[in-house]
Image (tube, coloured by chain):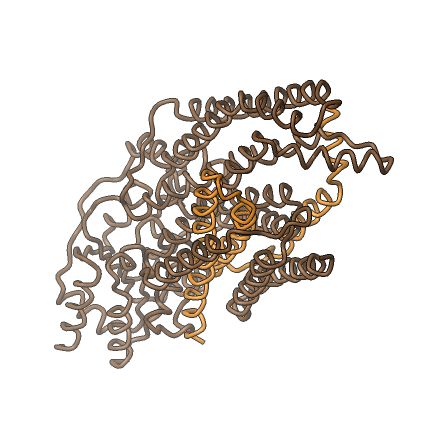
Amino acid sequence: MTAVLDFLQLHIEMVYVVILSIFLGIEVIGRVPSVLHTPLMSGANAIHGVVIIGAIIVMGKAEPDNYLALVLGFLAVILGTLNVVGGFVVTDRMLEMFKKKK
Amino acid sequence: MGSASSILAIAYLIGSVTFIVGLKMLSNPATARKGNLIAAAGMFLAIAGTIFLYEENGRKLGNYGWIFAGLAIGSVVGVLAAKKVKMTAMPEMVSMFNGMGGACAMLISIVEFNHLVHGGAEVNIVAGFKAIMAGAEYNAFTNVTGKLLVILLGLIIGSVSFAGSVIAWGKLNGKIKDFAFKGQHIVNLAVLGVILVLMVWLLVSAHHTSTSDYSIDLQINDAGLQLTSGGALAGLSAFFYIILILSIAYGVLFVMPIGGADMPVVISLLNSFTGVAAACGGFLYNNPVMLTGGILVGSAGTILTILMCKAMNRSLKNVLIGSFGASAKSGGGTAVQGNYKEISLSDAAVVLRYAGKVMIVPGYGLAVAQAQHVCHELEKLLEDRGVEVNYAIHPVAGRMPGHMNVLLAEADVPYEKLEEMEQANAAMPTTDAVLVLGANDVVNPAAKNDPSSPIYGMPILEVELAKMVIVNKRSMKPGYAGIENELFFQPKTSMLFGDAKTVLQQLVAEVKAL
């Protein structure tokens, strides 16, 4: 129990960021028309690709003889990039079609 | 030294802001595309900053060759996949990309766990000494336990999201069929329970082992310290991999019984899961942009999931627990049976050609047949001959909300011709002929009349109010929800069997010949 409390205290700023971000996320997309549900989901999908940064850090600090970290880190970088790049491009393609009809 | 990390901090700040602004702009049709590009630019900044400016304990990142190779492979494959995918297959694609993000979080957790086990504690001890020297109360063991907690959460959520998204992808492209067995909910809950119990157990034992080991070896030296702590934690790694395997199994079991019609909701939910998994990485690396990006997607994704459920007038609980297929079988006994009548192509062409007002109701069948272009051709042809043609768009027609809008926009159907459900329903009584193209559940009157129906309560397009209804389907097979549609047996309704694209091409030829 004390471990949890200490952890919270150590990271209290991040806990604040988490709680504020939760409310922000709710407010920001509160009134989205149903037509935009799919592109918005796809855009959000690309944004959580930010996990790629973790993959880059893992890869970047892997020791040259630590094959597990090297191989898994490399895979993680590829998958994370797929998420980010593919996500943004697919979203753009969807929205490009919306634009045409105006 | 210091300047590099402060520039990085600013890059992360800008990144976080672009994510917020991007999401905000994505929820408005006029600004959506720009919003996506802004978020992408922020992401690029954050990634580039991490590669060149990130340092940990004064050490910069290495392995640039690997990093750039990974980025290059991921970008090329990602762009090609995203550019080549057909409009109909976009939902699957989103699901697949989401799964990749989940897998990425999962892999990070695996590597970081091994790092923690094999001497990663060194950093904590140094930091702990520093903190104690500075007079602060600092508990190095807490830090190990806290780190392990975040690693485990990232592992569990990431792998559930990964496995679930791959199953959702397979279901949407028809490679995986619905699969449910008796008592599956209980099995699912049990698996989840075991995962959580193992997680807590692992945390508690890691806390105890690390605490006792450190307290013995604290007087010796750094090297000895690492060795002991490593050995003790390594004994727990078997449980770590059991958690990994169970989480993947849970992801599979969780999505398996949910019907294809509900996949958009599931993908949206898994999307927010991946967001939370990314945020765990934010905690792990004290990285604000991962934290804000991840949590934003986590909360916005959850709200979006609920909004999607609302558009279908169903509760999230209903989608997740009352798996569609199972309840449909019990309710299916009361299904209407009777005679339906077919209409010939030439008769259908005559009806459409001499109608004053025609309403086209597109559905998944149109998307599958890739018939949006020929559909637009028929619409133009009829308009040229003085028929007023509009499209009635149900919010969840197709496989995802907005699917039909995107599809028809691809074929250059003018925006004004797409009518939303309320507008379209108001126009139904004055419509002469409705042409239903591969839509089923969204025009099923059971949603209004039959309380035992699994789709009861879902708002539908009330096509039976029009003077005549022509339904194009490939066969009499029920739609994705797996339920009969009494609309097909009503006297006003005529069936026009065949693939949407072929039928529309023939209709175009027939109308031209008239």
Image quadrant occupied by the N terminus of chain B: bottom right
> What residue sits 61% from the left and 19% below the top?
B205
Image quadrant occupied by the C terminus of chain B: bottom left
B455 lies above or below B61: above
Q: In the picture, one chain is brown; tell me its letter.
A: B
> What residue sits 20% from the left and 66% below the top?
B504
Q: Does residue B431 appear left or right of residue B11 in this picture?
A: left
Q: x, y percentage for residue B285?
A: 63, 44
Q: Based on the displayed image, in which of its 4 quarters is residue B353 positioned? A: bottom left
Tell me the colour chain A is drawn in: orange
The reply to whether residue B280 is in sight is yes
* Front position in the image: B423 or B243: B243
Q: Based on the displayed image, in which of its 4 quarters is residue A29 positioned? A: bottom right
Q: x, y percentage for residue B329?
A: 31, 32
B488 lies above or below A95: above
> What residue sits 74% from the left and 57% below the top?
B2
* Front position in the image: B301 or A60: A60
Q: x, y percentage for residue A32?
A: 55, 59
Q: Does residue B330 appear left or right of residue A24 in this picture?
A: left
* Front position in the image: A75 or B307: A75
The reply to whether residue B302 is in sight is no
Q: Based on the displayed image, in which of its 4 quarters is residue B144 positioned? A: top right
